[in-house]
Image: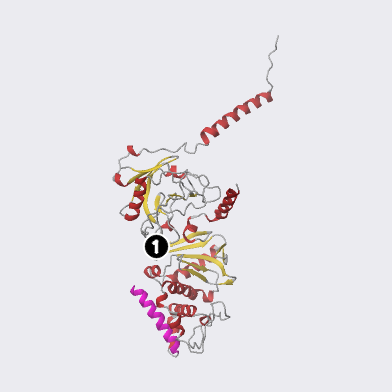
Amino acid sequence: MRLLVVLLLVLQVNSLQADEIFNLIKIPNLEVYKIDNNQGLKYLNSKQNFIIGVKNNIKCEKANKTNLANTFSIIERNLEKYDAKFLKKINLRFIVLCENLYISEINTAGIPDYKKRTLILDINFEKKYFERVIHHEIFHLVYDSFKEFFNDKTWSDFNKKSFKYAECSTCSDRLNLDLYDNTDGFVTEYSKSIPSEDMAEVFSFLIFDRINLENKSKNDPILLNKINYIKSGLDKINKL
Amino acid sequence: MINKIKASTSEKILFVFLILLIIFSFSFVFIIKNKCLFIENIDPKKINFKNPSNIVVMNIECGNVIIELMPEMSPNSVKRFKYFIKKGSYNGSTFYRVVKDTLVQAGDLEFGNIENINYYKVGSGRSMLGNLNSELNDNYQFIEGTVALARGDEFNTEDSEFFIILKNIPLYTGEYTPVGKVIYGLDALKKIKAGNKSEYVLRPDYINYFKLLR
């Protein structure tokens, strides 16, 4: 009898999660927004708030339909910069759109999950940074898929010897996302957090604001090395 | 001399009510509770199939479900699926996971047979034949009646479990290995017992037998 009660409790916990989308990516309360067959991307939006993660540390809210309609074209336009072949190589299949995305109580624009082939995006994220940050998050998938082409040690060696990254991306107060006037090896303050975030920042400007970034690199040999390193990694991926 | 006693109006109403109650109870037990009442049971022998070697018949509580396999789409998966059917491995296999009006899942050969179902482990059983590689197709549309192999969170973990979708699910295209399509008997599948609030079912319905047409 006790076993039966335990079993029923377990089944009860699962009850909200019983849908075909949850089966695939283990995020509850989603619905299909758009399936893009050309790019092989499947856009999903949250119809209710959801909480996921090992310690329930990822939270996001229901996507407001009007916000969704306004932001979707921006997201789609930016993701169209990548072809289907590339997206497949970096294991991106599902784009989850929700509002006010938090990980461990920190607001974030996106959370990529290489294993689940998913990128969660906060459609309410600060407009000023939103478009560029989409590419930043894409890079994390690139990095996770092709670690052999993006080595932290090689990257760190581009910097001045006196510079040290933080222990983790949220361990420091280096969070500002504005492009530096004087780059001096780093495009933004957030670049100084950890190597993979630095790479993601360079990549995002390379995709979103290439000319400006390349102009800055003319007087910044460290940045130039970093740009070339990212380009070289991307070339290797394209040749696969 | 005994005078004939006439029933009062209220007694007549009570009598009619009792009669109606009996009729309703009878109907409920024998008619309404029979979930298969309006389901047509298809006899595969009465149908001419183009390619009978690709036809399999699954018999469940509400009748036959006739499936056409697609070896040209997923050759290795269909070969494995056919092997289990031929061997009778799916006989007694429970539909332990049912998402109402969406999908039914069966085929756990280790923990999901009605004779010895293990509610704690059902869904995690293996066949001893090892994992199959996913055979995905970005062009195949997962329409109502598609039969596909289930897998773990990762690709290339398919084995014996399969599911049948009861509505179009375009999201599944390129995500699961399709092995066939229900051509008759979808209504019988829709009558499979679902859990009250969960996708996992206590005392689930099961496959009586699953066999090749030829």
* Badge 1 density bin: few <14, some 14–19, many ≥20, Cα 10 Å: few
In this picture, is B44 found above or below A152? above
- Report the residue that reaches farthest toward the top: B1
In the rendered image, which quarter contains the C terminus of chain A?
bottom left
Q: Which residue is mark 1?
A: A37
Q: Position of residue A63 (x, y in %)?
A: 55, 63
The one nearer the camera, A184 or A233, is A233
Q: Is residue A59 left or right of residue B133?
A: right
> In the image, B4: left or right of B122?
right
The answer to whether any part of residue A207 appears in the image is: yes
Q: Is residue B58 visible in this depiction of the protein? A: no
Please state the horizontal and vertical placement of residue B208, each as a whole percent of the image: 42, 41
Chain of the residue on which disc 1 is drawn:
A
In the rendering, at what x and y percent does residue A216 appear? 45, 87
What is the magenta range?
A220-240
Is A234 part of what is drawn in magenta? yes
The residue shown at (30%, 44%) is B52
The structure residue drawn at horizontal position 56% and vertical position 76%, both measured from the top left corner, is A170
Asked if residue B179 is among those painted magenta in the image, a careful observer would answer no
Residue B167 screen position, x and y as percent = 44, 50
